[in-house]
Amino acid sequence: MSNIAKKPAALPSEGFAITEGHDNFFTPLRLVFASLVVLGHAYAIALRDASLEPHMLYHYTFSYLAVNLFFIASGFLVTKSMVYRGDTPSFISARVLRIFPALAIHVLFVMFIIGPLATNIAWNDFFSSPDWYLQPLMVLTFFETDMNLPGIFDTNAEQFGSATLWTLRYEVIAYIGTLAVFSLGFLRKKWMVLAQFVLPSIGWIIGTRFGIFEALPGTIENLFRFGIAYGLGAAIYAYRERLNFGWITLAALITASYLLRKTEVLEVVMNAVLCWVIFRVAYMKAPKWAWLQRIPDLSYGIYIYHWCVLQLLFYWFPQLSVMELFALSFPPTVALAALSWYIVEKPMLRNKIKFANWLRGLGFKRPMAKQQYLLD
């Protein structure tokens, strides 16, 4: 018996349906999310204070909501990929080739291009500093991702070369978590996937309500924050045939968010509101906009390159306003993202099968034929 239904998962929401193929708008949505992050960080850099980034809804900023949107979409798509593949080597291959080659090139770009253009020390001292040559090791292991290179951006409020890479640590942790629950058999039942959303939600509420996070490293709070978003996306995939994405559902979620706006539960409800928006747009029936489904996925490149571009332009032109900085930085960021996609990301992704076979040669688990997942 196949572990994936071949027919669309119809939802009782005015003809709206989540389908199994690639007929969706996730790629343009991710471009919107990445653009929101760029806008939010333009505020933080141009105003020299991250706390001055405007609130988009309640106390949530552009960048905060955008990153949560990324994790919701990722939870859905990565869980879908894991169930579809049913194969550890294929899953690892797809995830590794999606994240690390482009990230490695980005690190080298900041080290060799951005750093020398933005440092206030002699190049001999710059290139001989351990803070320079240890960057690949620090970033690619996610030990320290800010790329605080010697003497860079000394007149900016932030001296980081790539301050947005810290979220990739949690993305990779989420991938490992998905692989773990698959390997342990925790994708066999739908309620097991739902628990991946419920448990971090409960943890967040308790941790925030009783001030537990204040006594712990920030990593713990972020694990719960992203666990809610990623787990919600995974749960949506598991229960996609039963969920209602109608307008009444949205009205109920918005009402709940307003009533709970001063409580710890708001984080959970707001993710549910974001979730409704993502899936209504991702699976909307819009034949006239179908061409958007074929655009290149530049979102990852925009996400990893935008910070260093914003920083460098503001370092050179500190008089720029927020919107001027955003307008001037966006085209070169998109250009770098396009180069990353066509020269690094897309070519590397063509090697998924070859890399998966190589992993099998190392003894990684082979596909589990006829195994069923997401049963009631």
Image (cartoon, rainbow, N blue to C red):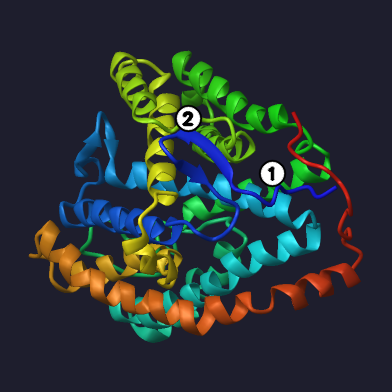
Q: Toward the viewer: 308 or 8? A: 8
- 349 w.r.t. 272: above or below: below
Q: Please say whether residue 364 is visible from this viewpoint.
A: yes
Q: Residue at x 37, y 40 (%)?
A: 277
Question: Mark 1 near mark 2, Cβ–Cβ under 8 Å?
Answer: no
**Rendering coords of residue 59 (x, y %):** 27, 30
Q: Where on the picture, by quarter, is residue 349?
A: bottom right
SS under mark 1: helix
Residue 144 higher or lower than 273, as above or below: below
Q: CA distance from mark 1 to mark 2?
A: 27 Å
Disc 1 target residue: 177
- Amino acid type, residue under disc 1 in the picture: Gly
Q: Position of residue 338 (x, y in %)?
A: 39, 78
Where does residue 45 sit, x and y in percent of width and height? 22, 56
Tell me: 353 left or right of 316: right
Q: Which residue is mark 2?
A: 244
Q: Residues within 10 Å of mark 1 (few under 14, many from 20)?
A: some
Q: Quarter of the image for the C terminus: give it.
A: top right
Secondary element at tag 2? loop
Q: Residue at x 78, y 70 (%)?
A: 356
Judged left or right of residue 293, residue 137 is: right
Going from N to C along the chain, the mark reached first, 1 or 2, is 1
Residue 290 or residue 234, whichever sits in front: 290
The residue at the point 53 percent across, 56 percent down is 144
For image coordinates 56% across by 37% down, the residue present is 236
